[in-house]
Image: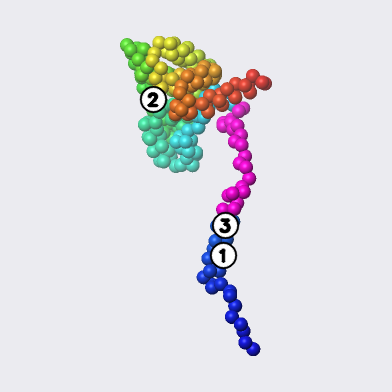
Amino acid sequence: MTFEPTNLPAPEVLLAVITLIPVLVAWALGLFSSASEPAGVITLGNPLRTSGVVFDHDPVHEPVVHLSRTETTRQLRDLALGLRNSPVEKAAPLLKHFMESGDPELALFAQSTLQQGREKLQAAAGRLQNHHAQTDPRIAAAVLETGLRQASPALTAPGEREGRVQTLAKKASEQLSSCEHTPRLLAACVRVFLTAGIPEKADAITRSMPEDSDLRRALEPDIRFAMHIKACAAAR
């Protein structure tokens, strides 16, 4: 029996064709892919929250709080020592936790660190309040920024904080009419109005900024969420 030669392609050609098949399929799927879904309106944060402060998640100190529940006494002392270099309003919750420790040395150190931090913040606020150049936008912005730090929930009681924030909001309105509108001052005013629960004023400030402004894009999500919270509260 004899076999006639066939015209089958060489193995190399078959391998090349098999290799190209997935590429051709992917290319075809790209040409005939379905239409993309339109982006929806996504609201970030917790809409049930009534506070005017939004997006206050602290990625640095919150893990330290979790560590404080499992570390040894010696390690807790090291944590407390490191908190001396942190902003007092950020370190205050953890320092208050350490003040209730059964270790007398740790409790005393935490108490003194918190007190020193409060005093330094108060001294800085006093220097800014008595500064001769109150119409300087740098000083004006620093006054608001320091005031917001002092009004932190970790450092003030709820009733006291409300009064501080309303005073800051009044101060921000005065500075907007008497100072040059620098980006730092505008950002400070926006944060004050958000904290005071007046997102409409914050929105008016950002709308006055250029549409391609990085600062405007950074502030707008906070403002939208604050207005959403206010709308939810009014609907109750």
The residue located at (51%, 18%) in the rendering is 204
Q: Farthest bottom residue?
A: 1
Rate crowding at label 2 as few (under 14), some (14 to 19) or many (20 or more) other CA atoms within 10 Å.
Answer: many
Disc 1 marks which residue? 18
Q: Farthest left residue?
A: 132
Q: What's the residue type where badge 2 is placed?
A: Gly
* Distance Cα–Cα, label 3 vs label 2: 66 Å
Which of the numbered marks, if any, corresponds to residue 117?
2
* Distance Cα–Cα, label 3 vs label 1: 10 Å
Magenta segment includes 41:
yes
Residue 186 located left or right of residue 48 = left
> Is the magenta region chiefly helix, strand or loop?
loop
Element at label 1? helix
The residue located at (61%, 34%) in the rendering is 40
Q: What's the residue type where badge 1 is placed?
A: Ile
Q: What's the residue type where badge 3 is placed?
A: Leu
Which of the numbered marks, if any, corresponds to residue 213?
none
Element at label 2? helix
Front label number (3 vs 2): 3
First in sequence: mark 3 vs mark 1:
1
Front label number (1 vs 2): 1
Rate crowding at label 1 as few (under 14), some (14 to 19) or many (20 or more) other CA atoms within 10 Å.
Answer: few
Colouring scheme applied when the structure was drawn: rainbow
Can residue 49 be seen here? The reply is: yes
Disc 3 marks which residue? 24
